Amino acid sequence: MVLATSLVQDIQNWSYQWSGAVMIVFFAVIIYVMLRMLKAMPRVKPQQIKPSSSQSVAWKDIAGADEAKAELQEIVEFLRDPKQFEKLGAKVPKGILLHGPPGTGKTLLAKAVAHESGAQFFAQSAAAFVEMFAGLGAARIRRLFAIARKQEPAIIFIDELDAVGGRRGADFSGEKDQTLNQLLVEMDGFATSGRLVVIAASNLLEKLDPALLRPGRFDRQIFVTPPDVKGRRGVLGVHTRDKPLGDVDLGLVAQQTSGLTGADLANICNEAAIFAARRGGKSITGGDFDQALERVIAGVQSHRVLNAHEKRVVAFHEAGHALCGELLPSVDRVHRISIVPRGRALGYTLNLPAEDRYLKTREELLDYMTVLLGGRVAEQIVFGAITTGASDDLKRVADIAHSMVHDYAMGSAGVGRTPDGPVRLSETTLRLRDEERRELIDESRRAARRMIVAHRAQLDALAAQLLSNEVLDRDAIDRVMAGVPRLERRPGVGLRVVAAAAPPVSPAAVPAAVPADPPVVAPKDS
């Protein structure tokens, strides 16, 4: 007993004597581990592109963005010759925000500004500033601006700005807010200089913090839109500059690709070259571009095998879409019908626009919904039953009807959208909007049924041609629809039959398209 008591007392004395040293060793180990963790973390360096490097982009390499190029030309002239502007008291804009849909060339425009002005170009994604450890994002912002200021005149390009520039107060950790605060200080703080330009790109302008968008930070906000038909022709020319072209009408391709961005057009040119190489050709033909357009819009051809009944259902479904599209006056003419599965679709009807339009009337939207519902109505008329193949059509019809009532006030009661924010609507308003949507959809369904019943012979002929050939092009559709007049819509009267049918036309001469949208495909889910 005495021995045990003595042992415990010795241990206590030893711990009292060495407790300080043990604590020092313990904290030294923690500090060592933390330093090792910090060294192991990746250090993201900004990508530097010199004006003379192979990655630089010139103005001649950009087409279809004339308005944005004109806005950025002043920045180029200022960085080239600042004295001309400084003697008049002008200052270079501190920030330029390029916003718009993905694939419109925002990054290429920033690279072109750096190349044409001769300035150093530093590019970094905004996602590189977001870290789980507080302070690291702000430190990377300071480091990026410090590097750029040493090589002025310089341009800093921040891609996907919304990753770090969102409205403050929504981040629980506070890291994003701290990073954004540092960016605000660097752009318009005490340490700013006049020879550093910040160019940023974002697809979500509405998400950005108001302090970031005010003058003095991003002085100019440039909306980069998808190119028009002239711009698409220029984009196609840029991307086919180093490709051997055969019998290809790039103007016709530009007309058929309304609503597509520069990235989409570049993909089509590349796919056309792949198709030409696959068949062993020495040049790219118009057929290669047709196949490339079909692949980009409708998807990759699938090897799924349908049984005889399913194939017949898909044929009548697509024939219903095509028949409504041929009869209605404001819908894009059908370019191709196919019952060959592509992607998730068991078949598709390809409508290619002939020109760019930017406004839609109520009647045009109703006609578009009628075309979408034509496949389902044809199934019900021919087979007396409906299938799951129209799920994508029904979703798009619901979206259009919702927008017509909520956004455009195109219902019979004219009830428009509510103010932004958490506004509570009454039961009467909600019920009225539901009734409006249902009435618009029912009106389109009734129109589709009337047309298909009245032109059953053409429906059967289109379906029979599809079952025998699997694919129908414009010429085959014209032969089936020969002598069938199109409908016309008059105010207060509705749809009426045109007196005489127009002769068959080529795809280059088809009437106006649904505005500013990509070519329409009516896919069917399995």
Image (cartoon, helix red, strand yellow):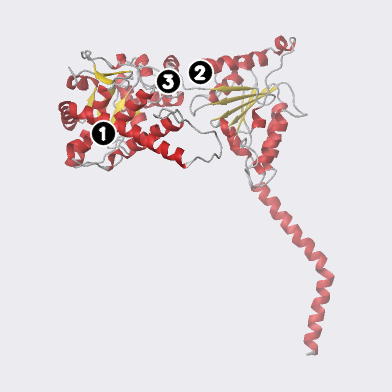
**Residue 463 in the figure: left or right of residue 189:** left
Label 3: how many residues lie within 10 Å, few (<14), some (14-19) or many (20+)?
Answer: few
Q: Which residue is mark 2?
A: 65
Amino acid at dot 2: Ala
Mark 1 or 2, which is nearer the eye?
1
Q: Quadrant of the N terminus?
A: bottom right
Q: Which residue is mark 1?
A: 375
Quarter residue 454 falls in = top left
Along the polypeptide, which appears first: circle 3 or circle 2?
2
- Residue depicted at 26% across the width and 36% down the height: 376
Q: CA distance from mark 1 to mark 2?
A: 38 Å
Label 1: how many residues lie within 10 Å, few (<14), some (14-19) or many (20+)?
Answer: many
Amino acid at dot 1: Gly
Q: Which residue is mark 3?
A: 359
Secondary structure beneath disc 2? loop
Secondary structure beneath disc 3? loop
Q: Position of residue 54 (x, y in %)?
A: 55, 23
